[in-house]
Amino acid sequence: MDEEKLLIRIAEMYYQEDKNQSQIAKELNIHRTTISRLLKRSREEGVVQITINYDKSTSYSLEQTLEQRFGLTKAVVIPVAPELSRQQKEHFLGKAASDYFLEYIKDGMKVGFSWGHALAAMVEEMGSRELKNVLCLPMIGGPSGKLASEYHVNTIAYAASKKLGCSALLIDSPAITETTELRTALMMNSFNQELSKLWQELEVAVFGIGSPSLSANDVWQGFYGKEVIKDLETKGIAGDVLSRFFDTAGKSVKSSLDDRIIGLTMEQLKKVPQRIGIAESKEKVGSIHAALLGGILTTLVTTEETAKEILLLD
């Protein structure tokens, strides 16, 4: 298959058949980075034309209302057609998040990342920059083989560092240890000691927002396991950030995981000056609203339809 036909086939699989890049790469036996490059080229060359018809003033008004109501530094609200698939919405959300992030990031900053779909989409859509002395850090441990590698915090932090022309540190510890004693022991090693100190110096934190409404989701099931999710269902959880859970008012809720997590605490996260939360969907409206009430984020990147639903709750 020549490259022009390949370009069209990949575009069909991604935009019409709702297949993700990993699935396309496996099916066509092509490296994932090639898929990403060809998808970008298909948009640049007009093979794929994405048209959004909307009144810009609506998004701007929603941004202002969110900023004023929740004391946000910035709200980024993007219009997307409701009939788009989740993957397509993630593409647009990731582009908006990366554009804002690139405007904000400066030489010398330390940036922390979490894991998941939203972060992977952001880094995938990120343009290249050449920044000096920027350091990309994972803010939580890895999923111990329970999560697709493209959504792993190390993958995201490393990919971001390549786009920014800077360095990254990768974590070699699980996000959630089997016991409290194991967490204590792992946090004593020199690397985790260094990482823990760097967490105190973060200037930017970028993260997704989890929702118990998606507890049947393969990512949640894979990361936490059915037993933990069942336990959380009894605690009135509204959502989570970095596996730290909160209620409908955005107040922290103690869970059985807290003493076993290798990652930032909610208190540490709230000390980071710029906290960018990226999330959208009907299922996450309550979780995002609670995170806003709790002052967990300073910047929200979401879709117009989600923003409207959030404001209806307030």
Image (cartoon, rainbow, N blue to C red):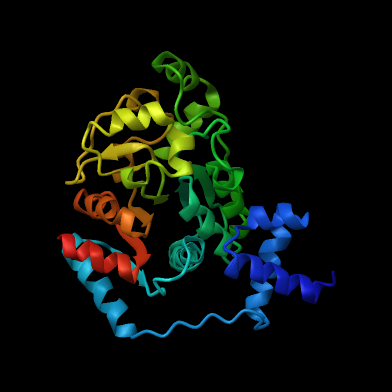
User: How far from the left and from the top, in percent, is residue 117?
Assistant: 49, 52
Q: Residue furthest front?
A: 17
Rendered residue at 25%/39% (across/down): 237
* Residue 110 seen: yes
Query: Is residue 151 placed above or below 103 in the rendered structure?
Result: above
User: How far from the left and from the top, in percent, is residue 137?
Assistant: 51, 43
Image quadrant assignment for residue 162: bottom right
Query: Is residue 43 placed above or below 24 in the rendered structure?
Result: below
Q: Residue furthest left?
A: 314
- Count the labels in the image: 0
Image quadrant assignment for residue 298: bottom left
Q: Quick one: quadrant of the C terminus?
A: bottom left
Q: Nearer the viewer, residue 210 or 244?
A: 210
Q: Quick one: quadrant of the N terminus?
A: bottom right
Q: Residue furthest right?
A: 2
* Residue 204 seen: no
User: How far from the left and from the top, in percent, is residue 175?
Assistant: 47, 31
Q: Nearer the viewer, residue 76 or 3?
A: 3
Q: Is residue 242 left or right of residue 106?
A: left
Q: Is residue 103 left or right of residue 267?
A: right
Rendered residue at 48%/48% (across/down): 116
Q: Nearer the viewer, residue 236 or 127?
A: 236
Query: Is residue 162 placed above or below 51 in the rendered structure?
Result: above
User: How far from the left and from the top, in percent, is residue 264?
Assistant: 38, 36
Q: Nearer the viewer, residue 20 or 156?
A: 20
Rendered residue at 31%/64% (across/down): 306
Image quadrant assignment for residue 97: bottom left
